[in-house]
Image (tube, rainbow, N blue to C red):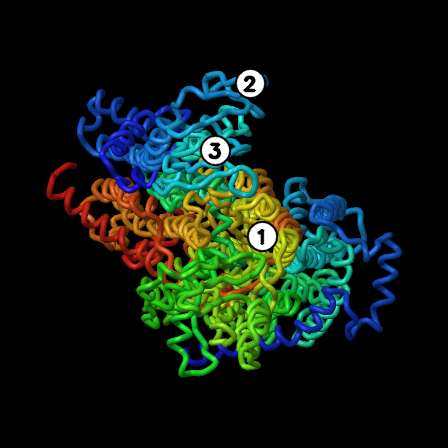
Amino acid sequence: MKKQSNSSYNQAIIKDALKGCLTKLTPKEQLKNPIIFVVYLGTFITGFIWIYESSRGNIPLFGFEFWVFVWLFFTVLFANFAEALAEGRGKAQASALRSGKKSGSANKLSEDGSLRKVSSESLRVGDVVVVSAGEVIPSDGEVIKGIASIDESAITGESAPVIRESGGDRNSVTGGTLVLSDEITIKITKNPGETFLDRMISLIEGAKRQKSPNEIALSILLMGLTAIFIVVTLTLKPMALHVNADISVVSLIALLVCLIPTTIGGLLSAIGIAGMDRLLKKNVLAMSGKAIEAAGDVNVLLLDKTGTITFGNRMASAFIPIDIKELDNLAYAALLTSLSDDTPEGKSTVTFAQNTYSAKEPANIQSAQFIPFSAYTRMSGLDLDGKEYRKGAVDAIEKCVTASGGKFPKEAHDMCMQIGKKGGTPLVVCEGSKVLGVIHLKDIIKPSIKEKFAEFRGMGIKTVMITGDNPITAAAIAAEAGVDDFVAEATPDTKIALIRNYQKEGFTVAMTGDGTNDAPALAQADVGLAMNSGTQAAKEAANMVDMDSSPTKLIEVVETGKELLMTRGALTTFSLANDIAKYFAIIPALFVVAFPQMEVLNIMHLSSPQSAILSAVIFNALIIIALIPLAISGVGYKALSADVVLGKNLVIYGLGGIIVPFAGIKLLDMLLATLHLL
Amino acid sequence: MVADITLFISFLILLLGAAKAYSGFFTKVLVGEKNVFTPLLLHVENSLYRLCGINPQLEMNWKKYALALMLFNGVGIVLVLVVVLSQHLLPLNPQGLPALPFELAFNTAVSFVTNTNWQNYSGESTMSYFSQMFVLSVQNFLSASTGIAVAVAFMRGIISKESESIGNFWADMVRITLYVLLPLSLVSALFLISQGVIQNFAPYVSAVTLEGVNQSIPMGPVASQEAIKMLGTNGGGFFNANSAHPFENPTSLSNFVQVFSILFLPVSLLFVYGKMSQKSGEGRSILIAMVVLFVLMLGSHYASEKFGNPQISGIVGESAMEGKEVRFGIASTSLFSVATTAASCGAVNAMHDSLTPLAGMVTMVQMMLGEIVIGGVGAGFYGMMAYVILSVFIAGLMIGRTPEYMGKKIEAKEMTYTVIAVLLPGLCILLFTGLSLLIPDATSSISNPGPHGLSQVLYAFSSASANNGSAFAGLSGNTLYYNYALAICMFVGRFGVIIPMLAIAGSLARKKVVPFGKGTLNTQSALFITLLVATIVLTGALTFFPSLALGPVIEHLMMLERISF
């Protein structure tokens, strides 16, 4: 999917969008957007007047009325284009997905144990199928037997295969993905049409797109404004008649179309669709626009320590010798004892010893006898040249040292205590009966995550770390990562209670999760982001799914939500601010014939009344096209306080909205004058 | 000019200081706490509850509150109707004035109940003392209390957390009338009497003028009505000349106090808002926005009047004083006329028809904005809140959050009601102005041709829809059409705003409070105040620029070319 979304403006999509702006011209489609529908009606009336009057010779065939008609028509087309373009990008992705869906057959396991080839469309919930290497998984389900590596790039765009196995939190498989190795037995959990892929397609296509709550509220405001502007223009006619100034119907329609918020009205649905699309580009699938809006409001982020804040594995971060002269020997021993330790801790010790202390394996390493790590001894090590090197937990090494007649030094105990207090894990290294020193294993905090959290604080978002660690370890990591709060020894129950508490206090809470036991909390959270690698239950409960299964994604989701809302606000402000210039173009033009004094209000010095009105109409149409890229890419969000963001946007979109049309209308008027169009 | 500006500045300082000082007591009354008058009036309050079968502890949701309010005001309309239709049968009618025709009676009833006090009649030749005292003055009190009650209910809606209740309408009405309006009116009436405002039940006095003409000088209980007329931002004069009449407004001191009392309670309510919400900054920021607008309006009004009319200023001195308050000068005229239209009062000490075109436009613009430049008692507060919600909605989006005010989310429901409250009065103004210009019967009431005539009609419907009640004069409003058309505007302009605002209050009351943080929109900042002022001006300008351009603007431009109507 990444592949398709990279070429966002490719020709096929633009071609489809061009087609879309014509097919959307039916009254039924137009009624969906009341503001553009007003323009649509205005176009018809203008067109009728143009044909009727020019056929009777009252007006020139290609005069003012003709050009107003043309540009009103373009206004409708441009609004259609904006929507079609946003939809088109989703459709392109959907059709790519759909092509992956056509797999056809599946090996269904009958009750008698025999395999039968059936069409994948016929599979229902509860059916059991067997999928072998090279075959496509026919539908969503759970692995009930076996283990396999699976290529999920069809839905995630990620080429690295993932492991799926029965039992535990990695048992869910998605229809449309490819089994690369081994054979698994899958119990189907979805009927056709309800699978993840189906849902994704319909979401991306925007077929079932519902207006989000804030979009509805904004539409109400825009419709209210449209209503009042209809009355403003309608009542202007008798008022003008009273003072003996006649206004033509075409001019009134032009005034109306310029006043109603066509810019934001034309772009509103594109902004919504583009918001989902932008998330999709980040490989996050939002189940509703509402969820994206909620993301913008998030002020508490619940972050799992493992994977989000830390790399997830404890790593060696320091060697602390008992005798400072023995530091190199300690590094050497640590390296040797870890060679047979395949745990992430062991591997990191090897890397650390090699990189930081340039410890090297001896040449005769082949002759060594390895003692691998076992849960029983809680030690690993090797015997080489008659020396016994061991590494392990404090008590295990203590036992080992005392057993071989040595004495476990008090310093080693103190060191271990210190490390524990800092949230780390100590491992003791000994050579025979002599304790060499301690390895400090530490949860390594991801680089620049602390800065990210500081940014969040600046935005007014509170970060809360959730971990299963004990309170001491948790506190140390929380302090180092710079989160605002933490919850230690967390269980799924504490998570859900925590979310409820925050929500009661009025906070909007976002969290990530992958396990089945996360599902209730994901459902309770305002924004629940499930990992695609997680269980079906988690994905069902969440309102967003991250295809990359990267917990840090939550941060980007919040930013996208904010961008969506900001884009809406910015374009609304811009659209309304535009009206001032349009008034100064049109009002003097309407009345200057009856009242030459009105020329004073023609502050742009537009060349003629008709050219003034037409310039305003053309500007009004072109600004929609000009703003499509902004609507689709969104107003960029930087983590700043609300006051700063508001000030900046007010200057750009408020003040800019006042100034830009003055310049634009003046330019268009000059252009019209040079072209002698009127 | 220096003296004029000193007057304006000292007026504002005195007003803000006094309003703030009073707000402590005002708040106590509104939340039902013990206050200085409790020992004196608690007994009366409780007896009233007992008499009317009111349980003041009973909490009402917004629907019940709105229903009680509508019932109460509905009964009010009927009572006024009954009395003015039968005043010839009732006592205290020394002039033997006849009953009012029905359409005028209806217009008057709606007018006084909606706090508009549009008067399609001359008080001295139409209303008996009984009608003036027992229904019109009473409605002056009750319509003012209603406005304050709605404002307080709205404050409760904003402040409360996940609650259904927005207070008890009956208790609010009793407390506001008893503890706030009655004592203040008493003090004000006594002061006005000391200045020479009359208060009697005597028949009209006949006199022979120096020219030997017989003149009938109207009398009546003026001071008692005058006090609440200003304090309650009602504006309905005892006499046709309103506060330009020496018996209503005899001295420059009484003039100053009258202007002061128009704005006193509305300003004080904003301090109350700060106290009730325990965020004094929130009340202050809104007050600053209002005062900024007020100063802008007063400045342009005064400048336009000072500049005068070039056609005659060479002949009569710097300003044209025809129709202005000649006794107190142009500054007092400007201050009075800006305050009265800022605050939905509608009392006048000058004929607004005689103002220069741009000064006339200022008075009209204030009404078209929905009387939120300080605004009427209560009405100014809740009217302004609609604009605050509108501003918050747009600004809130621009910071990347769904909008919220005082921690309450502004969603589709609030937006719907806000749009109704903001746009309905404007729709009334435009639709009825347009309609009136199409009806020959209606256009025949217009006394001047061209743009000035348009201004007369526009002003009348602005005044009615905004519940101001001042008249541009010049338009003969006592016709079948205008009596009903204006009554409709007054009714819609009042309750078409009150009900949506109560609905918003109810909806906000139910919501959770989002904690304040760095990511929240700061509604106390200078930036927000600027945005609020800009939203108000922009909304007003976009709605009324075309009609104003055809009325006062063109009239002004033509005046500069020495063409008049």
Lower position in the chain sequence, tag 3 or tag 2: 2
Chain letter, disc 1 residue: B
Image coordinates for residue B12, horizontal then vertical, percent: 53, 74
Instruction: Identify the secondary structure beneath mark 3.
Output: helix
In front: label 1 or label 2: 2
Q: Quadrant of the N terminus of chain A?
A: top left
Residue B32 in the figure: left or right of residue A56: right
Q: Which residue is mark 1?
A: B467
| Quadrant of residue A110 within the rendered picture | top right
Residue B12 in the figure: left or right of residue B27: left
User: Which one is nearer the viewer's eye here, B442 or A78?
Assistant: A78
Whether residue B314 can be seen here: yes
Chain letter, disc 3 residue: A
Q: Is residue A602 above or below residue A96?
A: below
Image coordinates for residue B313, horizontal then vertical, percent: 34, 67
Q: How many residues crowd mark 3 within 10 Å: few (<14), some (14–19), many (20+)?
A: many
Could you confirm whether marks 3 and 1 are on the same chain? Answer: no
Q: Give the amino acid type for the residue marked by disc 1 in the picture.
A: Asn
Q: CA distance from mark 3 to mark 1?
A: 59 Å
Whether residue A239 can be seen here: no
User: Which one is nearer the viewer's eye here, A333 or B419?
Assistant: A333
Q: Which residue is mark 3?
A: A196
Q: Residue drawn 57% across and 61% down?
A: A377
> Which disc is residue A110 wearing?
2
Q: Give the amino acid type for the residue marked by disc 3 in the picture.
A: Phe
Q: Give the amino acid type for the residue marked by disc 2 in the picture.
A: Ser
Residue A601 in the figure: left or right of residue A375: left
Instruction: Identify the secondary structure beneath mark 2.
Output: loop
